[in-house]
Each structure stands twice: as structure tokens, then as C-alpha cells.
Image (tube, rainbow, N blue to C red):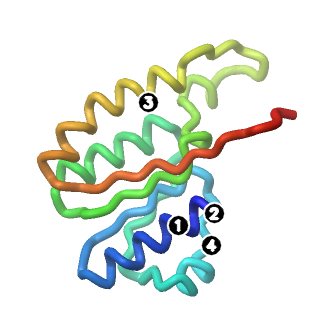
Amino acid sequence: GNTTLTLQVIAAAQREGRTCAFIDAEHALDPVYAKKLGVDIDNLLCSQPDTGEQALEICDALSRSGAVDVIIVDSVAALTPKAEIEGEIGDSHMGLAARMMSQAMRKLAGNLKNSNTLLIFINQIRMKIG
């Protein structure tokens, strides 16, 4: 589904000589599958960040560098704030992820425009929770 589509975007961009990055927040990228879709794994910048903040800082650094044309983040649901990771199970972190994303979007928007970088966030909708 979503990951397949974005890997196809990367493959097409790489065929045009563009530089691509895959921020694998889910730690689930299958290089064999990506290769089957035409992704040049050897020339794909790939990162598996530990926290949501780390993933978004990587996006920020890549967009500011101007050296990357396409950035994929897989997925928004896996961008867990550091405070949530370091906290106790059961701690309340209401709105933390939303605040983190809002702050990042404000910071990233200008950099992406200035560097002409495409940034795609993968997310999913849960129709039935539980």
C-alpha cells in the first residue's frame, strides 16, 4: 500500500538521477522488496531513528543541505516522542506527538521550499480501533 507507493516514487526519482532518503521510523524497510520495485538500495540514504524528534531533525538537516531531492518518512504513527519512550508505561502524554509534528512542520516548510525538496509522510487511518 503506502510504503509500496513511496518506494515507487523513490525508484522513479532515482531513475531521473535524483537523491532520495528513506526515514524508516517503523524499522521495517525490506531492502529485497524495495529492490524488486526498482529502488537502488546502494544509493538510498536510509536512517532508522530512535525517536520522533530524531526523525524530524534528520528531515530538517537533509532539507537544509539541499543535497536531497526526495525524503520519505515511514510512518507518522511510528514517530514516538522521546518523552514517551523514556517515560513509564501508563504515563499520560496527551497531545505530545501532535505538538511535535506541528512544530516540525513550521520549521520544515521554509527549508523544503527553498531547497525544492519533496517530503512525503506515510500515515494510516484505523477504521476499527482494537
Q: CA distance from mark 4 to mark 3?
A: 26 Å
Indicate which disc, 4 or 2, sits on the residue closer to the N terminus: 2
Indicate which disc, 3 or 1, sits on the residue closer to the N terminus: 1
Residue 71 image point, x, y percent: 36, 58
Circle 3 residue: 101
Disc number lying in front (2 or 3): 2
Circle 4 residue: 30
Q: Are marks 3 and 1 in contact (CB under 8 Å)?
A: no
Locate residue 14: give its quadrant: bottom left
The three-letter amino acid code for the residue at tag 3 is Met
The three-letter amino acid code for the residue at tag 2 is Gly
Q: Are marks 4 and 2 in contact (CB under 8 Å)?
A: no
Quadrant of the image containing the N terminus: bottom right
Image vertical order of residue 116 relative to residue 57, above or below = below
Disc sitting over residue 5 in the figure? 1
Residue 10 image point, x, y percent: 40, 71
Label 3 SS: helix
Q: CA distance from mark 4 to mark 2?
A: 14 Å
Q: Are marks 1 and 2 in contact (CB under 8 Å)?
A: yes
Image vertical order of residue 113 relative to residue 129, above or below = below
The three-letter amino acid code for the residue at tag 4 is Asp
Circle 2 residue: 1
Residue 80 image point, x, y percent: 58, 35
